[in-house]
Image (cartoon, helix red, strand yellow):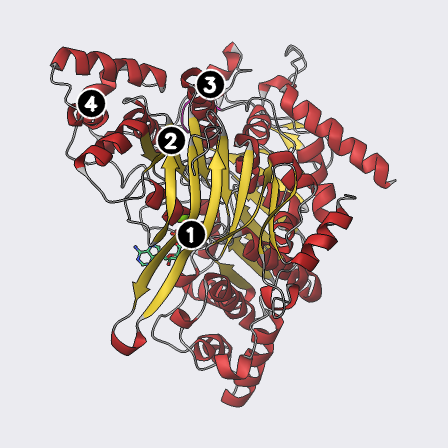
Amino acid sequence: MADAEYILEVKHLCQTFESGRGRKKITVKAVDDVSFSIRPSETFGLVGESGCGKTTTGRTIIRLYDPASGQVFFNGREISGRMTGELRRYLTDNIAMIFQDPIESLNPRMTIEEIIGEGLRVRGVKDKQEIRRRVNEMLCKVGLTQEHATRYPHEFSGGQRQRIGIARAMITQPKLIIADEPVSALDVSIQAQVINLLNDLKEEMGLTVLFIAHNLSVVKYFSDRIGVMYFGKLVEVARGDDLYKKPLHPYTRSLLSAIPEPNPFTERSRRRIDYDPKTAHDYSRESPRMVEIEQEHFVYCSPSEEAAYQKQLGL
Amino acid sequence: MSFELRRGETLAIVGESGSGKSVSIKSIMGILPSNAVVESGSIEYDGMDLTKVSEEQFHKLRGHRIGLIFQDPLSALNPIMKIGKQITEVRRLSGYGKKEARARALELMEAVGIPDPEKRFDQYPFQFSGGMRQRIVIAIALAGDPEILICDEPTTALDVTVQARILELINRIKQERGLSVIFITHDLGVVANVADRVNMMYAGKIVETGTSEEIFLEPAHPYTWALLSSMPDLQTHERLVAIPGTPPNMIDPPKGDAFAARNRYAMKIDFEKEPPIFKLSDTHDAATWLLHPNAPAVEIPPILRERIERMKGEMGNRG
Ligand SMILES: Nc1ncnc2c1ncn2[C@@H]1O[C@H](COP(=O)(O)OP(=O)(O)O)[C@@H](O)[C@H]1O
Ligand SMILES: [Mg+2]
């Protein structure tokens, strides 16, 4: 059942895609039995390499896709069931998404005011003055100005477009934001601007954020807790510092060992750890499952791996 | 703009998009878009001024002595040609026989870590993952026995674990073959991993140059400070120091120091006069008025100062 402690609960979520045709048709398990929960005002980071299922997880939660199986609860209410007009409204009221590519996600024929105000119109706000006032307020919040309202997306730089995307997501005052690689397409100096903006808005509006990214330094900086995905599965979930100081799953360790840091001294002695699931685990006799090995620290492992991890942590 | 590349070193060229880092390299390679002109300065390679050599000489240089690795391996590969053939072709162009070229290609595939070279030889690019494709591109670049390897954001499109392997590979072949490497990137972690020396670029100019140690431990240009303190590392908790605004329009470059408008340390003179280059050591110099004897002393961003202190501490621990 749903737990009042959490604003979002994802339980055994699965998503599949079919690719190819006829005899060659195969089913890809893009998300495979993923469970995690997020507390109100918390930022939960989802990391993993491209194709591991991060985007699909986010899109399935917000119902851009119907889940293959599993359940998702928002504030205790199931949002993974049959889609109705009422559920759609509930979702748009509460959850919004920020996309990686600020260029592709903005309609080129709409003015900035139309783009940002759309969420209000969809929700039945008809008063033009009211919409304009709230759009201008949002523009200010994301560091743009009223003069920008009548312009079109192509007149803006990448960083400004991402600000527009953020304003569009935030105007309906959602409780949960799913940010899918919101800074990955931006220049280094612009990334920091957008990260700071998201942090400010998070504070100011008490937002809960599901932050999806492949840059681990950024995820670590931005998130309270982090989930690591590998081939559709969540393999480890922990508080940021725990994950970085005592990673347990060999995939997490491999991922961490690969991040170059702006420090020539540590880089010269960097030792990369390889991960090969075939040799790293023996699941022929025991099956792996998600275990809470210490408080708030979950790892996907078999009973014997669990014992080894406990020893490693000195438990 | 001019710079030098020493034998056997890796020189990183760092900057954001539009900073001119790729343009400077493309002019070396003679594949500049036709509307670009090398306005001033020279690009020297083994005593030859590359802006002056004949086209014929240039093709020779490009094919043989300089190998190129781009960000997007797909654009560098012919999608309808077997990868073995793409590697041997370079070799054949330099006058090797078919058999020898094949043997050499297999050797290179092995060297860059493509498993099962014999079997993979006859496959097409689409049958490889992104990381494997980049290895093929590296094999092709090495096939002409280059002396210089130019890597233009070779790992930006790759996942971190794949990136780590490719960086290892480039570092290793550089050692083994005594190559000089020019590495273009905006990722300062990657710079720390590969570079012996670093050129920081802003708006088409080198604003600071130094050894990797000098750039990371004693950065002197406010743009270097800003870039270093704008990205979090795994220990960062404090607010990031964002660089305000966007890079200047290169068609109509601003007067004075191009970074002035975004520089929190900018002084009046920065908006009026371009700063000269100030020498800090035999290997380290920077173009900023802050180094002028009459400039006021300024504090570098705290987030960066702390990181540098931490690095120095780690160095101490290592003895
Ligand atoms: N619309 C789709 N149709 C078919 N396959 C898809 C689709 N979206 C994603 N996939 C596949 O699902 C897997 C997970 O993809 P994705 O969620 O985009 O990963 P990530 O965001 O972590 O890079 C990949 O194998 C991808 O190819
Ligand atoms: Mg994705």
Q: Marks 4 and 3, how far apart in space?
A: 23 Å
Q: Position of residue A248 (x, y in %)?
A: 67, 49
Which residue, given by chain and number where applicable, does mark 1 sit on?
Answer: A53
Sort mark 3 into few (<14), some (14-19) or many (20+) by Cα contacts within 10 Å: few
Q: Is residue A57 magenta?
A: no
Q: Residue at x 49, y 18 (%)?
A: B273
Which residue, given by chain and number where applicable, does mark 2 sit on?
Answer: A177
Q: Marks 1 and 3, how far apart in space?
A: 28 Å
Check chain identity for marks 2 and 1: say if they share one: yes
Instruction: Report in which chain the residue with disc 3 lies.
Output: A
Is B118 above or below relative to B48? below
Is B258 above or below relative to B58? above
Q: Is residue B245 magenta?
A: yes
Q: Residue at x 62, y 45 (%)?
A: A260
Which residue, given by chain and number where applicable, does mark 4 sit on?
Answer: A120
**What amino acid type should be assigned to the residue bearing mark 3?**
Glu
Q: Judging from the image, what secondary structure is the residue with disc 2 in?
A: strand
Q: Judging from the image, what secondary structure is the residue with disc 1 in?
A: loop
Say which quarter of the image contains residue B247. top left
Q: Marks 2 and 3, how far apart in space?
A: 13 Å
Q: Which residues are magenta?
A: B243-247
Sort mark 1 into few (<14), some (14-19) or many (20+) by Cα contacts within 10 Å: many
Majority secondary structure of magenta residues: loop
- Horizontal side, residue A134 vs residue A223: left or right: left
- Horizontal side, residue A273 vs residue A77: left or right: right
Instruction: Report in which chain the residue with disc 4 lies.
Output: A
Instruction: Report in which chain the residue with disc 2 lies.
Output: A
> Any mark on residue A203, and which?
3
